[in-house]
Image (cartoon, grey):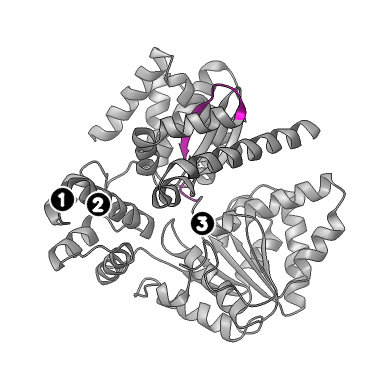
Amino acid sequence: MVGAKRGRWMLDTIWREARRRIRGELPEKDYETWIEPLRAASWEAGALTLETPSGFFRDWLRRHFLPTLEGAVSSASGEDASIVLVVNRAIDVPAHGPIQVRRGPLPASPPAQSQYTFDKFVVGASNQVAYGAALAVVDQPGARFNPFLVYGGPGLGKTHLTRAIGRALVERQRGPVACISAENFVNEMVGSLRGHRMERFRQHFRGIDTLIIDDIQFLAGKLKSQEEFLHTFNALHDGHKQIVLASDRPPREIPGIEETLRNRFAAGLLARIEMPDPALRQALVRRKAEALGLTVDVELTHYLAQHCCENVRELEGALKRLEVYASLSGTPVSVDLARHALEHQKNDSPTLQRICDEVCAEFGLRFQDLAGRRRTAHVATARQVAMLLCREETDLPLGRIGEVLGRDHSTVVYALGAIERRLGRDVEVRRAVEAVRSRLRAS
């Protein structure tokens, strides 16, 4: 326990000092755009692992800011340091941050939350029911739709909608609101258990007026955490307090959830957010481009809506990439520039299962070996390669990749750092990765 605390303290201290140094070197806009979103995941043997929001973000950092990062971390740590960049597409979501409890009015521009408001949520046929229900929750918290569970694939607006609920309730001064991911709920509970602070933990979560939990599927298989959450759920529900949940799937499809808790989730309103239809895609393109200060004509709007708008995160990434290309080349944004800037952005990404099948074929294993408990060097390497390619070839969060392979989020982060370091020195592993990657992209 002491060692873990010291390790976390070292990580936080080094990264805080490194950021201070970097801020003094870079223009403020560059710092806010490329450094501020990074999350320090681990510090081990002189290597700092940083999580980035996307593959494009990671690649841009490697090309343009890696020496700056390495120099700042080396100075902060007092030793020659290396940087490992991994992708975690969920890190820009505020729900993955620390617990937020608001008891009074929000400041004028709350950090990392101002973009999540109802007026900035683009409404269409695919999300209209969820949007209407969210407004109803704000009008009558704890009364009409309780619990309110919104579900759908990544990047479709679940976090935006749940954050908007929390923000609106705070602005109306409807009592304290706690916003937290299910993963952080579990981490808080484990820390409270170890620190003999469970009574304080319970009082905190049962003394609020609205509880907003993101990625509720993270509770799957964690029986002790489910039990504690069920007690919290019951205490709030019995007190007519509002509960808002977000998940990547409906309760009946979440594996490893106790039936009692599953029934509680399904007892309120379930609202699905579906893939955006053509009209909503075009509206999203216009709104997101406007937010970036990009002028897009009708032809470019149609092109982006057709090729880069499976979900909001994909669209935001495409627009940011287009903005960077336009800025660096001095060329006005156009369909031709978009084709060039986004030529490597895949529309038909392979599924997790397809990736795992190809890795198994390359290493002579079965899927049960990848997802099982075997820890031989051969199996461990194959598992890390599968995690790496799942991260590169899909838009799924690291937690979901871990679920498929029977591992938790922190294990995936560690594995990605390990395999990226190994790729720099192990020719055979690098050859295996390239072979699988080529087959995936050839189909």
Check the image and report above or below for 358 versus 426.
Answer: below
**Element under disc 2:** helix
Amino acid type of the residue tagged 3 in the rendering: Val
**Element under disc 3:** loop
Q: Indicate whether residue 373 is drawn in magenta.
A: no
**In this rendering, does residue 191 appear at all?**
yes
Quick one: label 3 or label 1, which is nearer the N terminus?
A: 3
Residue identifier under label 2:
322
Magenta span covers which residues? 77-90
**In this rendering, does residue 416 appear at all?**
no
In which quadrant is the C terminus drawn?
A: top left
* Contact (Cβ within 8 Å) of mark 2 with mark 1: yes
Check the image and report above or below for 222 versus 149.
Answer: above
CA distance separating discs 3 and 1: 29 Å
Quick one: label 2 or label 3, which is nearer the N terminus?
A: 3
**Element under disc 1:** helix
Point out which mark residue 367 bears. none
Residue identifier under label 1:
337
Check the image and report above or below for 76 versus 403.
Answer: above
Left/right of residue 167 with respect to residue 242 in the rendered view = left
- Place of residue 393 in the rendered image (x, y in percent of width and height, measured from the top left): 36, 39
Amino acid type of the residue tagged 2 in the rendering: Leu
Looking at this view, is 394 or 333 the one in front?
333
CA distance separating discs 2 and 1: 8 Å
Residue identifier under label 3:
93
Left/right of residue 425 with respect to residue 251 in the rendered view = left
- Place of residue 248 in the rendered image (x, y in percent of width and height, measured from the top left): 50, 57
Circle 3 crowding by C-alpha within 10 Å: few under 14, some 14–19, many from 20: some
Tell me the mark number nearer the camera, choosing from 3 and 1: 1
